Image (spheres, rainbow, N blue to C red):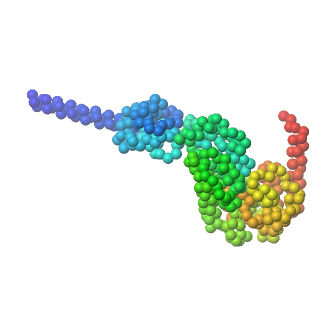
């Protein structure tokens, strides 16, 4: 009898072990295998949320198949107390293991809303965007110019949220004065700026910041990036360039930046100015003259007057020889590359060609023909504007 009882107990024990092993294998498969989500979603973890509350919310939104397995997996992996508040992009078919990793990784939110303060040559504007989880693309919610209009309620309502990502984007060709002037209107930044940084010393780039970040510290980061870019590219410059210092190359890069917005043209534009320097010709470029008029403080907003083209200033390259004394804007990496590794051409002239680009020429006669074509395009455009365009 006792042998029978012992045998039955052993059999039951083995059955229990087999069932437990099966359940464990099934649970592991559920935890690491593809999840039930058909499309990606944004999932928010609030400050102070418990693992139990988060697991139930995930189950309700079909991000996980079983809240209990998610909790057990979190406990087993030692991440039960590691939830970080914020908004997270949970991808389609993401496993519980991946969801847990995302929600405990920390750092910036991977989903939700972003405020991008964009500083361009024409103006600075605040853009509030929200990530569409289904397409993984940001959708613009509101955009406004803080210099010309009050902050809309759609922006004000979200600025105190913890999971907002803040970004400052500096476009190529903006002057240092414009950068400082714009940053003063960025209400999510703090601190004073003692002085405008040297022209050309700030790197056009996108900078992720925190709410309340110091303006001076941000400008210092911009300067650090530009110095690093300049040092890197100066070390790989072409031989025989007419620059004695990196500062002179930066001046040339700023002129190239202001002369063309076509990336493919930059090295050829640089070759024109370098050829002129090497032949002792004046640069004769309008952007330098404009900088002499505005001092970089805003946009001229009109054409240059003949008196301004004749006036002798340190920046009037129709009058002075060689380069102006400083850069005339903050050039981007591509323009610096163009100044330090220009195309090898015999071009000495260029003029707009009506396509957004330029027509280049080796001789003055060829250049005059290109200018005549451009004047004809301008005249036709002016006539069409005056007479109206008919559909």
Task: Say whether residue 147 is left or right of residue 47.
Answer: right
Q: Which of 298 and 384 is in front in this view?
A: 298
Residue 321 visible (yes or no): yes
Across and down, in percent, residue 146 comes to 69, 43
Q: Tell me the residue at 31%/35% (across/down).
A: 22
Q: Tell me the residue at 87%/55% (across/down).
A: 305
In the image as oriented, which residue stretches furthest toward the top? 1
Q: Tell me the residue at 13%/29% (across/down).
A: 5
Q: Tell me the residue at 42%/31% (across/down).
A: 56
Q: Establish if 113 lies above or below 205.
A: above
Q: In the rendered view of the protein, which quadrant contains the C terminus? A: top right
Figure quadrant of residue 194: bottom right
Q: In the rendered view of the protein, which quadrant contains the N terminus? A: top left
Across and down, in percent, residue 37 comes to 49, 33
Q: Nearer the viewer, residue 37 or 326?
A: 326
Q: Establish if 276 lies above or below 286.
A: below
């Amino acid at each position: 009898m006792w042998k029978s009882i012992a045998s039955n107990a052993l059999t039951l024990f083995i059955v229990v072990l087999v069932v437990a092993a099966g359940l464990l294998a099934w649970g592991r498969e559920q935890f690491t295998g593809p999840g039930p989500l058909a499309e990606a979603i944004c999932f928010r973890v609030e400050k102070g949320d418990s693992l139990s509350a988060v697991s139930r919310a995930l189950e309700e939104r079909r991000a996980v198949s079983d809240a209990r397995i998610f909790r057990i997996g979190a406990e087993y992996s030692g991440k039960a107390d590691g939830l970080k508040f914020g908004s997270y992009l949970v991808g389609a078919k993401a496993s519980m293991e991946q969801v847990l990793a995302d929600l405990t990784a920390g750092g910036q939110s991977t989903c939700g809303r972003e405020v991008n303060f964009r500083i361009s040559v024409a103006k600075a504007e605040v853009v509030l965007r929200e990530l569409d989880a289904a397409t993984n693309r940001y959708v613009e919610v509101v955009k406004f110019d803080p210099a010309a209009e009050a902050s809309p309620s759609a922006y004000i309502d979200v600025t105190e949220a913890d999971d907002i990502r803040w970004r400052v984007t500096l476009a190529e060709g903006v002057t240092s004065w414009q950068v400082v002037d714009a940053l003063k209107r960025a209400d999510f930044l703090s601190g004073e700026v003692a002085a405008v940084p040297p022209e050309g010393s700030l790197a056009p780039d996108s900078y992720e910041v925190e709410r309340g970040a110091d303006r001076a510290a941000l400008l210092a980061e911009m300067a650090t990036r530009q110095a690093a870019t300049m040092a890197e590219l100066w070390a790989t410059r072409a031989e025989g360039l007419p620059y004695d210092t990196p500062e002179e190359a930066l001046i040339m890069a700023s002129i190239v930046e202001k002369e063309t917005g076509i990336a493919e043209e930059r090295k050829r534009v640089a070759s024109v100015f370098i050829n002129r320097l090497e032949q002792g010709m004046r640069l004769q470029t309008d952007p330098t003259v404009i900088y002499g008029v505005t001092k970089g403080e805003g946009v001229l907003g009109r054409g240059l007057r003949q008196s301004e083209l004749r006036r002798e200033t340190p920046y009037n390259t129709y009058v002075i020889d060689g380069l102006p004394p400083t850069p005339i804007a903050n050039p981007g990496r591509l323009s610096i590359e163009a100044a330090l590794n220009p195309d090898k051409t015999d071009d000495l002239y260029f003029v707009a060609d009506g396509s957004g680009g330029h027509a280049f020429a080796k001789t003055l006669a060829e250049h005059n023909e290109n200018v005549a074509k451009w004047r004809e395009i301008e005249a036709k455009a002016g006539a069409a504007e005056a007479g109206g365009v008919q559909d």
